[in-house]
């Protein structure tokens, strides 16, 4: 999934995993990840049949992405062929069959200094672009679930307050006017 920050990429994958009743983990990726750590994550997913979201995957160094491609491809090839084991970094690894493992990646193409996902690695995933949500509609629904009778009017006021606060108040680390913090 690709798209700007705050569009629900990670939450969407988490909700899909939970709706399917599958163990689901989120791993926040960074340029500090190495191929060994990535290998442990992918091997663990394959062995237990869990799903994972590799969040902000385009932060990972290009050398690690190259190794991740070969590791992920060996798992996917074995699953497609119906094998019970795959060769992973020179060792045979048992594969969980029910449920099978799954991996999702999220990328935020807007930030500078991010790695471009190589074509061979990108080909292992189905692309899906996310756009900024209709914040007023989401807040209106949240207010309705809490029993507010004038939810539409209140939602408009909450959105206006957040927009004005974001544009008029000084930039501070503790100010967060995005939807995630407004939902609290």
Image (tube, rainbow, N blue to C red):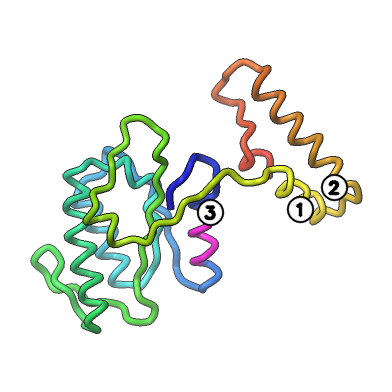
- Mark 1: give few (<14), some (14-19) or many (20+) Cα within 10 Å: some
**Among the 4 quarters of the image, the one containing residue 176:** top right
Asked if labels 3 and 1 touch by Cβ distance under 8 angstroms, the answer is no
Above or below, 159 against 35 in this view is above
Residue positioned most to the right: 149
Residue positioned most to the left: 90
Marks 1 and 3, the one that precedes in the sequence: 3
Residue sitting at x 17%, y 53%: 67
Residue sitting at x 87%, y 50%: 148
Above or below, 10 against 22 in this view is above
Marks 3 and 2, the one that precedes in the sequence: 3
Q: Secondary structure at mark 3?
A: helix
- Mark 3: give few (<14), some (14-19) or many (20+) Cα within 10 Å: few
Q: In x, y percent, where is residue 102?
A: 36, 67
Tag 1 residue = 141
Q: Is residue 89 magenta?
A: no
The answer to whether any part of residue 87 appears in the image is yes
Above or below, 43 against 156 in this view is below
**Among the 4 quarters of the image, the one containing residue 48:** bottom left
Camera-side residue of 153 and 119: 119
Which stretch appears magenta? 11-17
Whole-angstrom CA distance, mark 2 to mark 1, is 7 Å
Q: Secondary structure at mark 2?
A: helix
Tag 3 residue = 11
Asked if labels 1 and 2 touch by Cβ distance under 8 angstroms, the answer is yes
Whole-angstrom CA distance, mark 1 to mark 3, is 17 Å
Q: In the image, is 33 to the left or to the right of 159?
A: left
Q: Which mark is residue 151?
A: 2
Camera-side residue of 106 and 19: 106
Q: In x, y percent, where is residue 121?
A: 25, 55
Q: Secondary structure at mark 1?
A: helix
């Amino acid at each position: 999934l690709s798209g700007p920050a705050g569009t629900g990429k990670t939450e969407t994958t988490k909700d899909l995993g939970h709706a399917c009743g599958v163990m689901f983990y989120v791993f926040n990726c960074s340029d500090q990840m190495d191929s060994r750590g990535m290998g442990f994550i992918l091997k663990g997913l394959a062995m237990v049949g869990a799903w994972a979201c590799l969040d902000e995957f385009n932060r990972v160094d290009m050398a690690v992405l190259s190794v991740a491609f070969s590791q992920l491809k060996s798992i996917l090839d074995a699953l497609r062929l119906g094998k019970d084991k795959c060769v992973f970094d020179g060792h045979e690894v048992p594969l969980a069959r029910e449920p099978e493992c799954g991996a999702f990646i999220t990328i935020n193409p807007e930030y500078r200094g991010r790695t471009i996902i190589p074509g061979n690695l990108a080909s292992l995933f189905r692309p899906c672009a996310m756009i900024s949500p209709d914040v007023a509609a989401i807040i209106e629904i949240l207010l309705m679930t809490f029993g507010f009778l004038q939810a539409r009017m209140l939602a408009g006021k909450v959105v206006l307050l957040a927009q004005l606060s974001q544009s008029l108040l000084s930039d501070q680390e503790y100010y967060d006017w995005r939807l995630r913090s407004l939902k609290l």
